[in-house]
Image (cartoon, rainbow, N blue to C red):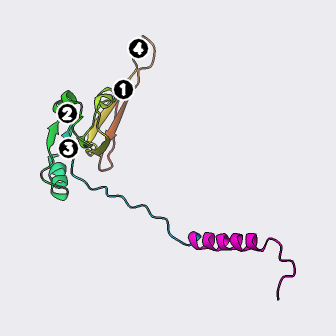
């Protein structure tokens, strides 16, 4: 069956073709591929609490030629020679992080140590006022804690 009014026929054909292309594009998967494993400009930084076994395992998986730096060496150099830094241990303070000029920082934290990790108490101790002390403790098995 033909349409009697052939006005704007070219316009309708163009719009129909665009609609078909849009429907086809909706079915295409959206993918972004990036190469993230590069060893050029990488370095390992050892901070306080770093586990030597984790560092050795990381070097085996990546590239054994990655340079290993101590925290002081990196801070004196400001990390300008490296694109990405793999930080092992407890990391840096906020002020130290501001001085590092690397493009990418990848943090590999050490496991939390067992036992008491933090203690806090009243900053002002006054007579006849209750004294409180709080502690954060990491334990691996249930136990009964008593205090007096």
Marks 2,3: beta carbons within 8 A: yes
The image quadrant where one finds the N terminus is: bottom right
Q: Quadrant of residue 32?
A: bottom left
Which residue is disc 1 drawn over?
A: 120
Marks 1,3: beta carbons within 8 A: no
Which residue is disc 3 drawn over?
A: 43
Provide the secondary structure element on which disc 3 rests.
strand
Provide the secondary structure element on which disc 2 rests.
helix
Sequence-first disc among 2 and 4: 2
Sequence-first disc among 1 and 3: 3
Most common SS among magenta residues: helix
Nearest the camera: 65 or 70?
65
Region of the chain picked out in magenta, as a range: 1-25
Nearer to us of marks 3 and 4 is 3
Q: Is 88 rendered above or below residue 57?
A: above
Badge 1: few (under 14), some or many (20 or more) residues near its Cα, within 10 Å? few
Which residue is disc 2 drawn over?
A: 74
Sequence-first disc among 3 and 4: 3
Nearest the camera: 81 or 86?
81
User: In 3D space, how far apart are the residues under numbered discs 1 and 3 (Cα atoms)?
Assistant: 37 Å
């Amino acid at each position: 069956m033909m349409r009697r009014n052939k006005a704007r026929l070219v316009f309708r054909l163009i719009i129909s073709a665009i609609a078909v292309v849009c429907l086809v594009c909706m079915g295409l998967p959206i993918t972004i591929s990036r190469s993230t494993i590069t060893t050029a400009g990488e370095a390992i930084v050892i901070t306080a609490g770093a586990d030597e076994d984790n560092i050795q395992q990381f070097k085996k998986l990546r590239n054994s030629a990655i340079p290993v730096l101590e925290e002081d060496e990196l801070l004196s150099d400001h990390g300008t020679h490296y694109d990405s830094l793999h930080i092992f241990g407890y990391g840096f303070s906020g002020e130290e992080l501001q001085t590092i000029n690397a493009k990418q920082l990848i943090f590999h934290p050490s496991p939390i140590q067992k036992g008491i990790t933090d203690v806090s108490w009243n900053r002002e101790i006054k007579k006849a006022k209750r004294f409180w002390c709080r502690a954060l403790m990491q334990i691996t098995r249930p136990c009964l804690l008593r205090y007096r």
